[in-house]
Amino acid sequence: MFELKKQVRPNIWELEPYSCARDEFKGEASVYLDANENPFDLPFNRYPDPLQKNLKSEIKKIKGIKCRNTFLGNGSDEAIDLLYRIFCEPQKDNVVAITPTYGMYKVCADINNVEYRNVLLDENFQIKADALLERTDENTRIIWLCSPNNPTGNLLNPLEIEKILKNFSGIVVIDEAYIDFADSESWSKRLSEFPNMVILQTLSKAWGCAGLRLGIAYASEAIIGLFNKVKYPYNVNDSSQKIAAETLRQYGIFKERRDTIIDEREKLKSNLLNLPFVRHIYPSDANFILVKVDNANATYQYLVKDGIIVRNRNSVVLCENSLRITIGTPKENEILLDTLKKMPY
Ligand SMILES: *Cc1c(COP(=O)(O)O)cnc(C)c1O
């Protein structure tokens, strides 16, 4: 059984958070003399909204999740780090994750001095719930899942995910950074079923706002409360909040570009398969494809020489001789393809 208090570090459970000026007075006023701000230098003289209420309500209009189940951070990377700081006692607790997956889960574990346990995906890059559960013990606080997974591009089997959610008494994180490209519902729709589930999403990929740094976590109100206690008071700056809110109001542009990227992904895939040195392209529900070639290092170097940068995943377990290629504009994808066609083979 999941019992939140047992999973949280005692110092965090007891933490009395910093109370900023904007926490202590929440109404509307005409004269603000409470935060030692500069009264001139508009429009950035004021501290931003610590709980990003406007932006959250724009996100709610699109994603349909209540603001009180939503945390916003300086990229999902902030949420990843906060999860360690909330749940994992350094040098005592551990986490379990799949491999290969997004590198930040491991880096943040190392920074926080938390043991990181790997479980290898199968040959189809799928998970087995039992294999992950077997690696847990009484000090396991988090299981990290990423679906669609990076760098493999595939969705993880929902039945296995559900089994993990039901049978693990700690936190299960499902990173859905690429969910907007996927032909599948977000797990955030099932928040009320699973009090131990944390969903991560981001405005960095399909929403085209990587430079603004805006990550989203969806979880129970109790877990969101812990995020809010531990985060920096003003963790998302005012210009990011405003520009992101404006971007979210332009759903038509988002949808058109997202659909173009998906079309281009399928087109690039079939074109690449005609090249003699392309051995396999893995199924992708994301805005990138993992491509197995005869010689990833040589292909990577050849592309670099022509000013085209892809991600060489040759040294990643199960991704030997594989390149991760982000889907670009139609023009960029054409340049990539033309350049590869000319590669000496
Ligand atoms: C790109 C990516 C993110 C996004 O991180 P941000 O800090 O929000 O830019 C998160 N998780 C995965 C798996 C990613 O690939």
Image (cartoon, rainbow, N blue to C red):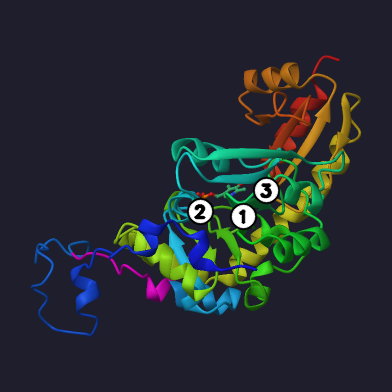
Asked if residue 333 lies left or right of residue 64, the reply is right
CB atoms at circles 3 and 2 under 8 Å apart? no
Q: Please, what secondary structure does the residue beneath circle 2 have?
A: helix
In the rendered structure, which segment of residues is drawn in magenta? 46-55
Distance (Cα) linking label 1 and label 2: 8 Å
CB atoms at circles 1 and 2 under 8 Å apart? yes
- The amino acid type found where label 1 is placed reads Ala
Q: Please, what secondary structure does the residue beneath circle 1 have?
A: loop
Q: Nearer the viewer, residue 87 or 161?
A: 87
Residue 70 against residue 75 in the figure, above or below: below
Q: Nearer the viewer, residue 191 or 301?
A: 191
In the picture, the disc for residue 136 is 3
- The amino acid type found where label 2 is placed reads Ser
Foreground: disc 3 or disc 2: 3
For the image, the number of numbered tags is 3
Q: Which residue is mark 2?
A: 76
Earlier in the chain: of badge 1 and badge 2, it is 2
Asked if residue 254 lies left or right of residue 330, the reply is left
* Residue 319: percent from left, percent from top: 77, 31
Q: Residue at x 21, y 85 (%)?
A: 28
Asked if residue 252 lies left or right of residue 18, the reply is right
Q: Please, what secondary structure does the residue beneath circle 3 have?
A: loop
Taking the magenta stretch, the answer to whether it contains residue 344 is no
Does the numbered disc 1 mark a residue whose Cβ is under 8 Å from ligand 1?
A: yes
Specify the quadrant that holds the C terminus.
top right
Looking at the magenta stretch, what is its main secondary structure? Answer: loop
Q: Which residue is mark 1?
A: 177
